Structures are given as C-alpha cells and as structure tokens.
Amino acid sequence: IFPLDVEDHLEPNDTRLTAAPVTRETDQSLLILGSDEDWFRIPANVGQALGCRIDFSTEGGNLDLELFDPSGYLLDTSYGTGGSESVYVNEALVAGDYFVRVFHASGSRDAASAYDVTFTLPVPPTSCDQPVPSSVPNNVYASNPSQDSAFGHGVDADGDRVIVGDPAYAQFG
C-alpha cells in the first residue's frame, strides 16, 4: 500500500483540463490513490487510430478506462474486472485532443493501485502528393484510366497520374 501523499511523475493530471500530454508509447509505475483519477491527452487528426491499454495487479483494486473525443463525448469504455483494460478508436472523426481517463472502479475507491500504460499513438498520414522524381521515365505511367488495375496503375479518381505499384492506391476487394 502506498502513502496517500505519494504521486507519480505525471501529477497533477487529475482532470481533463490538467490531462498529461502523451509523449511516448509506454509509461510505467503510475499510481491511482483512492478517488484520484489520471487523465491523458492524445492529439489526433481525422482518420487516425488511437487507443490505450493499462495493466495492473487487482490486489491494489480494480481500475477502469474511458476514451473521450475532443468535445468530451464518451467513445469507448473498459469496465472489466481483470488485470488489464483497453480502449480504442479505429478512426478519429474530428481533429483535436482525445482524452483517456483511468480511475478506480466503484468498489475500489479506497485502494491504491500501480499500473503501466501503453498508448496506440496516431500515425501521421502519408502524402500521395509527392513530386514525381525526374529520374522516373515517362513510360512508368499509364495515361489512360482504362489501364487501371487492382494494383493502382494508371490514373486515380482525380485524374492524377499514379506510379505503377504505388501501395497507397492499391485496393483489394
């Protein structure tokens, strides 16, 4: 059991307004004491996936996990009774800061719990608007949309030329 005046290195992060910015994928030995809560802030752009997993010993009490969008709407919850919880969103619908809340389950509010956290951080989108290298010969391109194939050859829906074999344009049904 931890003394009540012990805090982890991310405090104060007890509210959405004081949420700790996520700067790395994992953090270990974080603490939830009594009715304390830990909040984390994850910036994301539209279309990016993000999430969080916590691992803990249930001897110190049961922890729960929630994920909120930038407006405060609850997107995902994990209220299990085991030693891990996870929340995830496949695709951010709006750009902004998403928030994760870690807290004791209702029957564990007097407990002290240590936990490790792992984040699924948003990956920056790749750009298809890259200039064509001057070393690529013109015959690498198909100029007729009817020459398109399942591997992305030819011209995309916007009429832009596509490099043969560009995986960004490959679509598998």
Image (cartoon, rainbow, N blue to C red):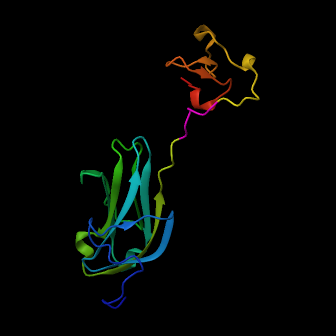
Q: Pinpoint residue 102: horizontal percent, then vertical percent.
A: 33, 67
Q: Is residue 101 above or below residue 12?
A: above
The answer to whether residue 21 is left or right of residue 139 is left
Q: Which SS type dominates the magenta stretch?
A: loop
The answer to whether residue 157 is left or right of residue 151 is left
- In the displayed image of the protein, which residue is found farthest to the front? 134
- The quadrant where residue 81 appears: bottom left
Q: Is residue 87 visible?
A: no
Q: Pinpoint residue 133: horizontal percent, then vertical percent.
A: 70, 31
Instruction: Decide whether residue 127 is among the magenta residues.
Output: yes
Tell me where the magenta segment starts and ends, as one range.
Answer: 126-131
Q: Is residue 48 above or below residue 129?
A: below
Q: Pinpoint residue 87: horizontal percent, then vertical percent.
A: 38, 55
Residue name at image x 33 percent, y 67 percent: 19
- The quadrant where residue 164 appears: top right
Q: Pinpoint residue 147: horizontal percent, then vertical percent.
A: 63, 10
- The quadrant where residue 129 appears: top right
Q: Which corner quadrant holds the N terminus?
A: bottom left
Residue name at image x 43 percent, y 61 percent: 53
Instruction: Decide whether residue 120 is among the magenta residues.
Output: no
Q: Is residue 31 above or below residue 42?
A: below
Q: Foreground residue, 172 or 94?
A: 94
The answer to whether residue 19 is left or right of residue 129 is left
